[in-house]
Amino acid sequence: MTRHSGAMTVVTIVLMVAGFVGLSRVPTGFVPIGDQGYLLVGVQLPDGASLQRTDAAMAAARKIAAATPGVLHVLTVSDVSSLDNNATLANAGVAYVVLKDWSKRGPSEDLLVIYEHLTKALATLPEATAFELPPPPIQGIGNTGGFTVMAELRDGSQDFDKLQTLLPLPYRVSAVRRETADVVDLDLVPEGGRVPGFAPGQFNMIYAFGVGEVPISLSGNPADTSRFVHTVRAVGAVSEAIAGAAPGTMLGLRGPFGSAWPVAAAVGHDVLMIAGGLGLAPLRPAVYQVLAESERFGRITLLYGGRGPGELLFRNELSAWQERPDISVAVTVDHADPAWRARWAWCRR
């Protein structure tokens, strides 16, 4: 070996250089961070900040994250600090940013690009500091492993279809139509899968991520299996979030649930349907079904009223139904305006 000391020195130097280059390029973690389909965003406000300020900051962070290309939906939780082992703190919150399936993301929507985009966009939050936390390479290690939810069937059955109904499925808002100043129609289509059938009178549980869940009646045509239609009035925090959803917004949905209008029992008989205001929304699927098989029923009549002409729902459809020979439609209001030309008027005793 001493006779080849020069060659051995060269080999040693080559190995040292190769080791240095390799260590500088290989990830230093035990396992490199991979794209697991989600990441966390921690939000921190100054000490002493109220929960109301935190909620406002979380809403702003959710809006920014939801508008990021490659993001499917965002779930925010206030009053939790991801930097303090998930301790309860009024001035902190965490957002779970769920990404689209890898097959539906382009080359510019990988984890690193989304991470960098969020870093720049969230830096504009005026009152809070936001930081992105990719999930750990090994689940259960670190503070960003997420959370686990377990649902249990307590009736002794093995009905896994029933268990599945407890989980909200992602639905995308495909269209929004305004009916009145505070009422909109939302068309919801599933993000994969199909729309299950429903009966007139049933409802879905609709979840606005990071806000809450409320029951909303189905108002579309039961024969239309391409979408769910819901008519929503903005009257609270959750319904305001749902009614304010723009096309492309992701909502969670469970259902359909509830009993149905006894349409089949009315076959061979006259049908009288009466609704007021927003009450026409859950009744509209029954109108669709009866009119689709109008020859099986006797006389069909719809009576509908509202506080004023501007608060009537589905006005184009009401006009179209009034032109049909197989249904009698009468519309009335409490307070008419000079342009009101309906055949019937409200009578007070």
Image (cartoon, rainbow, N blue to C red):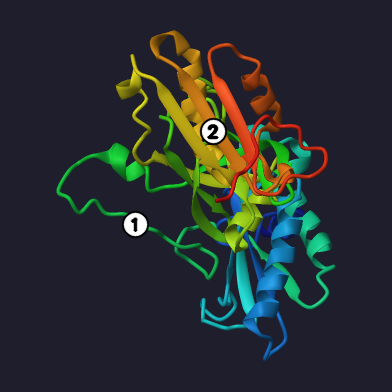
Residue type at mark 1 is Met
Q: Nearer the viewer, mark 2 or mark 1?
A: 2
Q: For mark 2, does the 10 Å Cα neighbourhood hold few (<14), some (14 to 19), or many (20 or more) residues?
A: some
Instruction: Please give the residue where the numbered disc 1 appears in the rendered image.
Output: 150
**Where on the picture, by quarter, is residue 237?**
bottom right
Question: Can you see residue 16?
Answer: no
Give the residue at the far left of this rendering.
156
The spot of residue 239 in percent (x, y) is: 60, 55
Badge 1 density bin: few <14, some 14–19, many ≥20, Cα 10 Å:
few
The residue positioned 52% from the left and 69% from the top of the image is 142
Kindly identify the amino acid type of the residue bearing the numbered disc 2: Leu
Residue 158: x, y in percent? Answer: 20, 41
Specify the farthest residue to the front: 349
Q: Which residue occupies the extreme bottom position in the image?
A: 48
What secondary structure is marked by label 2?
A: strand
x%, y% of residue 335?
70, 49
Does 224 appear above or below 131? above
Image position of 121 with respect to 189: above or below = below
Instruction: Pick the quarter of the image with the N terminus.
Output: bottom right
Quarter of the rendering containing residue 306: top right
Which residue shows up at 37% across the image and 43% down it? 165
- Give the mark nearer the N terminus: 2 vs 1: 1
The residue lying toward the viewer, choosing from 306 and 42, is 306
Q: Which residue is mark 2?
A: 303
